[in-house]
Image (tube, rainbow, N blue to C red):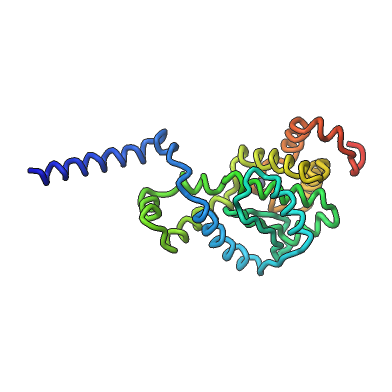
Amino acid sequence: MKCSRITRLIFSGLIFLSVFLFSSPAYALITGFINRDTEIKIGEEISKQVEQENGGAYSDPRVTRIGKSVAARSGRQDLPYSFKVLKTDKVNAVSLPGGFVYIYKGLLDVIGKDDDMLAYVLAHEAEHAAQKHVIKSIENEMSTELILSLALGKSSQTIQQMAGIGWNIIQLGYSRENEYDADHWGVSDMILAGYNPWGAIQMLEKFKEMSSGKSIEWLGTHPNPEDRIKKLETDYAQQLAKAKNKYGDK
Ligand SMILES: [Zn+2]
């Protein structure tokens, strides 16, 4: 009899757990269970694939210096931020969980020698990682089975599965809300690091100009530059008015 009571208890516990996991409001509460170490491991796993798919990556001292200077102003200082260049002509940039940021050579060529534009792109990407945009989406998309296998000790297979979900999310693109967030905090970081916020506006203007002539990969996963310029001009009206618009009158 004692045994069946225990069985019943376990059963009702399991039913409670599954109701908790599957009813959507409760499900949404279960976030924040991926810890920092796992977050970094997921990023490392995706980075292997990203580098392989794009002909490899290299470190560029200027990209590293500017990237580290804006990341040092971000809201999260417990990530091992790294900034590398992917050897492809695509005009794009991407960031992975854990703070692995990549700028594609094609975008670096478009930016040329302009440190302010580069600071904006790197800060925007670093903020996606700092704000855990991919990690939060992975948590929402993990199956109960995967959550349990993570809870039971993360095997490399669990990490690989989570990395697969993460890479899918990145390729599909972030929500508009996440993008505006990365823009907002990214520009704040670049201003605090001493860069000219007009660099952000100019970068978006450049994307807008280029989008009529050729395909810009970065625009495929990001909201319309026009809307983002308007938003930044509202959010940072004072700072933009104070900074010198070295790109000429607008
Ligand atoms: Zn973005």
Residue 94 in the image: x percent, y percent?
65, 54
Residue 112 relative to residue 79: left or right: right
Q: On screen, 71 above or below 160?
A: above
Residue 106 in the image: x percent, y percent?
75, 60
Quadrant of the snapshot with the N terminus:
top left
Residue 108 relative to residue 3: left or right: right
Residue 179: tell me if it is visible: yes
Residue, x 56% and y 60% (percent of image)? 46
Residue 215: tell me if it is visible: no
Residue, x 62% and y 39% (percent of image)? 176
Quadrant of the snapshot with the C terminus:
top right
Residue 101's image quarter? bottom right
Residue 52's image quarter? bottom right
Residue 235 relative to residue 160: left or right: right
> Total of numbered circles in the picture?
0
Residue 18 in the image: x percent, y percent?
31, 41
Residue, x 83% and y 35% (percent of image)? 240
Question: In terms of depth relative to the viewer, which is nearer, 83 or 113?
Answer: 83
Question: In terms of depth relative to the viewer, which is nearer, 134 or 167?
Answer: 134
Residue, x 76% and y 64% (percent of image)? 60
Residue 204 in the image: x percent, y percent?
77, 44
- Outermost left residue: 1
